[in-house]
Image: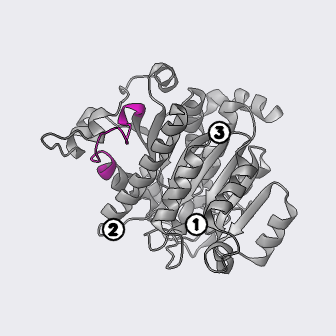
Amino acid sequence: MFIFDFWQLIYNQIPKMDKLIRFNNDDLASLLKIRTNESKFGEQVKLLPSSANIYDSLSTLDVKYVIFGIKEDVGVFANYGKPGTSMAWEATIKVLLNVQNNAHTHPSKVLLLGYLDFSKVMEKLASYDQTLKKDINKARKDVAKIDKHVAFLVHEVVRAGKIPIIIGGGHNNAYGNIKGTSLALKKMVNAINFDAHTDFRTEEGRHSGNGFSYAYAEGFLKNYFIFGLHENYTSDSIFKQLSRLKNIRFNTYESLCVRHETNFENAMKKASEFISDRPFGLEIDCDAIENIPSSAMTPSGFSVQRAREFVHHFGKLENVKYLHICEAAPTPETETKVGKLITYLITDFIRANQSKISD
């Protein structure tokens, strides 16, 4: 319990919501495309007034899901990756608001909160040189600062009894998601990660490749399952490390889709048994989905259909506490494609979770 008591001591020292840009009615009006005889998702979502206290308001609102974005590339840069993940939020919100409001999409259960704005850090990032270790170290310190804001916002949403749906940024934000959820619930949580990579690399300063290892080392993460790991891009030392840790399990993309050692449904069931006995986070890395613009786009990965099935399967489980969709890096040419993909995953999650409540 020490770690949770310590959090209470430092709680008031954390900058509170100074990075949160709340979505408002003007934003909504600028993006909505109204059509006669149709009702759009964005016409039914809830918004918070700019002055409202987030925890107090969420505690009383009849919503279940709180959607917000994270606009940053810093964690990816600090991991020597390709930037662009800061653009996923805007690509998504343009599409999400304009899907249909009907019995299958449940927008009345959604609060659209806004996004965490790290534009000042991003301005600094533009002057960094990825080939210089000193600039990588600066970026990693910036990621540690971003962590605090992500963890705090997730903490407030989960503490209010709602499910955060977190869009954008690098996979470094898994750390803040896990930490915020763990501290809100005052217990360790589990995580399932649909990913080509472990993101369990050395604690060498924060970046997109070690969010889970930091969360594990600091006592926020208990059981961790990596689903669809790519054998070509996982080092021998990582495989040996994973084999030594009883709280971490994985399967590989090749075992599922090339060698067919087990089928997709059985693999999901096995993963569920490992993580669903306590509160868990659902992490979706777009690097795992074939030909989706991302920080490490792959020509060989899971189909969009498989990704949607995965989100449905884990979204309907009793103990799921958040959904995080990350690492998508849209360009102007691929913005709509990425926005549609993430919107499908969001609405699949809500449908599955609402079916659990109805049951």
Crowding around mark 1 (Cα neighbors within 10 Å: few <14, some 14 to 19, many 20+) is: some
Residue 313 image point, x, y percent: 57, 51
Identify which amino acid the numbered label 2 is placed on.
Thr
26 on left or right of 233: left
Per the image, is 102 magenta?
yes
Q: CA distance from mark 2 to mark 3?
A: 34 Å
Q: Which mark is residue 334?
A: 2
**Is residue 170 visible in this depiction of the protein?**
no
Task: Report if residue 281 is visible in the image.
Answer: yes
> Magenta residues?
94-110
Residue name at image x 45 percent, y 43 percent = 351
- Residue lying at the far left of the rendered structure: 36
Q: Secondary structure at mark 2?
A: loop
The residue beneath circle 1 is: 135
Q: Are the two marked residues, 2 and 3, in contact with CB atoms closer than 8 angstroms?
A: no
- What residue lies at 57% left-to-right and 58% top-to-bottom? 171
- Name the residue carrying label 3: 319
Q: Residue at x 71, y 67 (%)?
A: 251
Amino acid type at mark 1: Asp
Classify 10 Å Cα crowding around label 2: few (below 14), some (14-19), many (20 and above): few
Q: Earlier in the sequence, mark 3 or mark 1?
A: 1
